[in-house]
Amino acid sequence: MATFIISGSRGTDDPTMATLPFMAAKVAKEQGHDVVLWLWNEAVTLGRKGAADHVTGVNLTPLKDLLAAVQTAGIPIWVCGACAVARQIKDTDLVAGSTIKGMPDYIKAVAERDRNIMF
């Protein structure tokens, strides 16, 4: 089993790229790996309740379905704190399974993980 931190930086501005980190996290978990999903930049908006409901990348599974799979699998969703503040996103705005985390948490996780995949 490998350990992954999978990072997404795109939000509703690019539905295809926004969907890919959720797909990768789901597949990695299904393959038995330990996964953390890190949302930063515009991707933090996807951590907001209801935001994923209308995001579908080109020929991809709708993001709302992938988010549900990530949540069901118990994959932690970390939302960049500085990015969330810039977009006025608070803990109470977030979907279940997500937490606002700081850069020290991200750097520590990257240092501890086998792989860091960025979208």
Image (cartoon, helix red, strand yellow):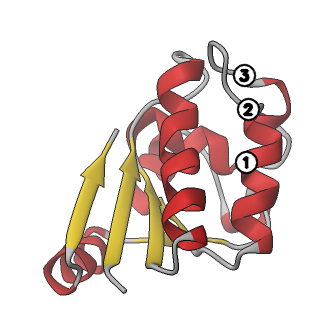
Q: Given the image, on which type of amino acid does mark 1 rest?
A: Leu
Element at label 3: loop
Q: Label 1, label 2: how many angstroms apart (C-alpha)?
A: 7 Å
Return the residue nearer the eye: 43 or 85.
43
Say if mark 1 contacts mark 2, CB within 8 Å: yes
Element at label 1: helix
Q: Is residue 77 above or below residue 89?
A: below
Packing grade of label 3 (10 A; few <14, some 14-19, many >=20) is: many
Give the residue number, with chain letter if any, for mark 1: 66
Residue 119 percent location from the top left of the image = 34, 38
Q: Which of the marked residues, 3 or 2, is nearer the chain's N terminus?
A: 3
Say if mark 3 contacts mark 2, CB within 8 Å: yes
Q: Which of the marked residues, 3 or 1, is nearer the chain's N terminus?
A: 3
- Label at residue 91: none
Residue 12's image quarter?
A: top right
Q: Given the image, on which type of amino acid does mark 2 rest?
A: Thr
